[in-house]
Amino acid sequence: MDAKDILGLPKTAHPLSQEKKSRPPKESQRKPDGISREVYALIGGVPPLMPAVETSQLKKRPPTDEKITWQWLPFTSSARKDNLQLYHWVRVVNGVPPTGDYSFAKYNKSVDVVKYTDEEYEKYLTDPMWTREETDQLFDMCQRFDLRFIVIADRFPSSRTVEELKDRYYSVSRAILIARAASPADVSGHPIVKEPYKVAQERERKRALSMVLSQTKHQERKDAEVLAEAKRIAEARMVARSAKELELPVTLNDGLENNERALVPGETVSPSSNSQFPSGTVAPSTLMADNASTLGSLKMLRVYLRTYALDQMIQAASSSAGLRTIKRVEQSLQELGVNLKPRVPTKAVCSHHLELRKEILTLLNLQKQLQYKEAEGSSYRDSPYETPGTPKDRTFVPDSMSFGGERVVKRDQKRKAPGRAEAPSSPAQSKRPRKLKASDL
């Protein structure tokens, strides 16, 4: 027995009515192929086949004070000139039918074809290739078919091409507009006068189009390869031209200025010590190369923000400097009260900001060189073993160049007694005289 049996409580932890109902398993929708994960997360699944309509819109009823009916009523259209009367269903509110023109009459657009008189024709429009009757028929059909020259050429009595019909129509219209204007400047902005129709160009365009449409797959591939190669060559020439333009007016001037600044401390230093500058010194050739590469990459972008160009130029100018030097440059700018990035990045402001950074970087490099030279001079002054005239590169040459020379000396020292003096060495024996040869006589 347990406490529940004693108290007469049910053995279940909770009543059956309070048990959690098992939820049906949620069907996981699989992402369809061809849709990225981000797009599928935005759309929230596959869209429904039918547009969803809210139930509130279905139950919405019109106001009770409006009585809407549909009636079969006649109507006329201003687009027709014969006053034809037709019928259609109309939505009538409170028994009042709608008034006004037919709603689709506004889409009836017609072309304003120029009309000429007999006097104008005889004075401005005579052409040996066209008669008066053909010209009248052309303008009547242009008015009737709204300048659909394909239809006009199909129904024209004489055998005329589409280009010939267009040339005659636009040349007559242009001549009439210029003749009726008070001055040619009044109609200079008209499309027909501003851009006259060119028959030869239209025929060449159609011929080229027919050639393109009649090409085979092999010819299309060859043309695509030729175009790709031409594009590559054009891009290479553009890069070379831009690099050449940037090198001549920009990088050379900057390089000369950097050379002059870098040579200022070198005037008081001997030429032999130029190679002993600290590693933090920036070479002018390196700056020129970095500036040229940065300007070349910006030229390739064609469109870029001036702040982005300033950041790239700052990185190029500080690429050879260390992290501590860059921090010192920023600290110097803050001490001068200059923002690290200009608030108004105009062209002049960005150029002056970049010039100030370069001058600060040059100043820090000169300070490093000065500290290096002062440390080198102090080491010469404090050294007790060297004098200014002592050559540094003197090498020690031992007396005995034979191997084991030190070992022979040590052995001799061991053999000698503590108080015994060293006996003088015997003089060298005289050499035997050399025999004379026949050549010596």
Image (spheres, grey):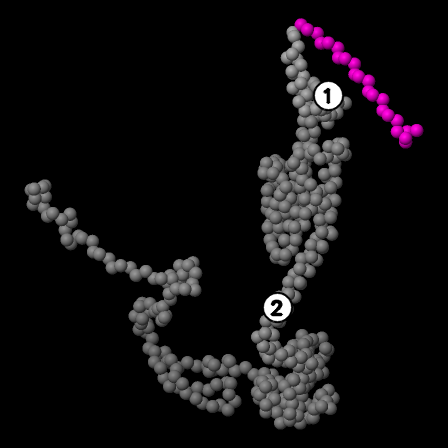
Which residue is found at the position 71% from the left and 46% from the top? 254
**Residue 15, position as x, y percentages in the image:** 14, 51
How would you rate the neighbour count of disc 2 (Cα within 10 Å): few for under 14, some for 14-19, many for 20 or more? few
For the residues labelled 1 and 2, say whether their Cβ atoms are less than 8 Å apart.
no
Closest to the observer, 105 or 354: 354
**Residue 13, position as x, y percentages in the image:** 15, 47
Task: Say which amino acid is labelled 2.
Answer: Glu
Residues at marks 1 and 2, CA–CA distance in whole angstroms = 79 Å
**Residue 66, position as x, y percentages in the image:** 34, 75
Q: Which residue is mark 1?
A: 399
Q: Main secondary structure of the magenta part?
A: loop
Q: Is residue 282 left or right of residue 95?
A: right
Which residue is found at the position 60% from the left and 42% from the top? 339
Which residue is found at the position 72% from the left and 89% from the top? 127
Q: Is residue 167 above or below residue 39?
A: below
Q: Secondary structure at mark 1?
A: loop
Which residue is found at the position 71% from the left and 9% from the top? 422
Q: The C terminus is located in which quarter?
A: top right
Q: Which residues are magenta?
A: 419-441
Q: Which residue is mark 2?
A: 225
Q: Secondary structure at mark 2?
A: helix
Q: Tell me which corner region of the image, top left, top right, bottom left or bottom right, holds residue 58.
A: bottom left
How would you rate the neighbour count of disc 1 (Cα within 10 Å): few for under 14, some for 14-19, many for 20 or more? few
